[in-house]
Image (cartoon, rainbow, N blue to C red):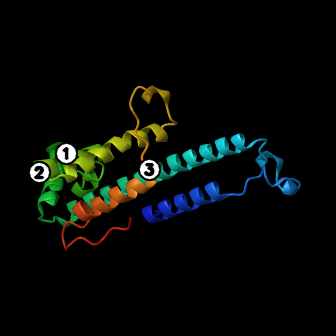
């Protein structure tokens, strides 16, 4: 799995290249060497295409960051269930697992069954835990949950059926900051937890 650091680094590098690329309009002498589909007729056309490329890079990078985020949250949740940690958030995770793991599921291994718990349920549990603890971090959880509306929209082909929903498109740099906050509050909450790879 590619790390959030790598995703952000790739995004920033591509963004820099697009913004700082030489203008093909001004570089008429090089026209013969450049594939004609990349030669712009006007500065306005060139600027428009650069903006479209930047927007597409932002969408793709944000989607990848959120996919990474979900994977790391799930990894932390699954590790918590299998290690039976005793901190308060871990106890909440275990209670969530127990709630889903009813008597009818006793024929399945508990850890494997609980690894299938919907991500929204895990995120809701984290948010509720911090809200009930009067910790302002719960607002960061709400922001992340809102960003997953974008992830679903993007993953399902940018479907117009979600157009009535206000889709917040996160900036990859903001997602990295949010990841760092989750690290402090969730991923590294006890000395027993090893730092997960971002």
Q: Separation of disc 3 and disc 1 at Cα?
A: 34 Å
Q: Quadrant of residue 88?
A: bottom left
Query: Residue 141 appears at what percent x and percent y?
Result: 26, 49
Q: Separation of disc 1 and disc 2 at Cα?
A: 26 Å
Q: Separation of disc 3 and disc 2 at Cα?
A: 27 Å
Q: Nearer the viewer, residue 197 or 169?
A: 169
Q: Which class describes the residues within 10 Å of circle 3: few (<14), some (14-19), or many (20+)?
A: some
Query: Residue 103 appears at what percent x and percent y?
Result: 14, 45
Q: Quadrant of residue 142?
A: top left
Query: Residue 147 appears at what percent x and percent y?
Result: 37, 44
**Would you say 88 lies left or right of 55 here?**
left
Q: Nearer the viewer, residue 198 or 111?
A: 198
The tag earlier along the polypeptide, 3 or 1, is 1
Residue on which disc 2 sits: 134
> Which mark lies nearer to you, 1 or 2?
2
Badge number at residue 171 = 3
Badge number at residue 85 = none
Q: Is residue 118 visible?
A: no
Q: Secondary structure at mark 3?
A: loop
Q: Which class describes the residues within 10 Å of circle 2: few (<14), some (14-19), or many (20+)?
A: few
In the picture shown, does residue 126 fall above or below 4?
above
Residue on which disc 1 sits: 100
Q: Secondary structure at mark 2?
A: loop
Q: Quadrant of the C terminus?
A: bottom left
Q: Is residue 157 visible?
A: yes
């Amino acid at each position: 799995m590619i790390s959030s650091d790598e995703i952000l680094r790739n995004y920033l590098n591509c963004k820099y290249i697009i913004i700082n690329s030489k203008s093909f309009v001004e570089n008429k002498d090089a026209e013969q060497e450049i594939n004609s589909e990349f030669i712009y007729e006007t500065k306005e056309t060139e600027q428009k295409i650069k903006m479209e490329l930047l927007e597409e890079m932002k969408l793709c990078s944000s989607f990848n960051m959120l996919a990474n985020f979900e994977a790391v949250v799930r990894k932390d949740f699954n590790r918590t269930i299998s290690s039976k940690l005793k901190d308060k958030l871990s106890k909440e995770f275990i209670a969530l697992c127990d709630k889903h793991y009813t008597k009818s599921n006793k024929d399945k291994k508990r850890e494997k069954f609980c690894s299938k718990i919907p991500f929204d349920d895990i995120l809701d549990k984290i948010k509720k835990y911090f809200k009930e603890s009067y910790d302002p971090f719960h607002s960061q959880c709400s922001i992340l949950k809102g960003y997953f509306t974008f992830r679903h929209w993007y993953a399902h082909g940018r479907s117009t059926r979600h157009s009535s929903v206000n889709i917040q498109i996160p900036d990859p740099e903001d997602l990295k900051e949010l990841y760092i906050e989750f690290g402090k509050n969730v991923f590294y909450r006890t000395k027993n937890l090893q730092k997960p790879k971002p």
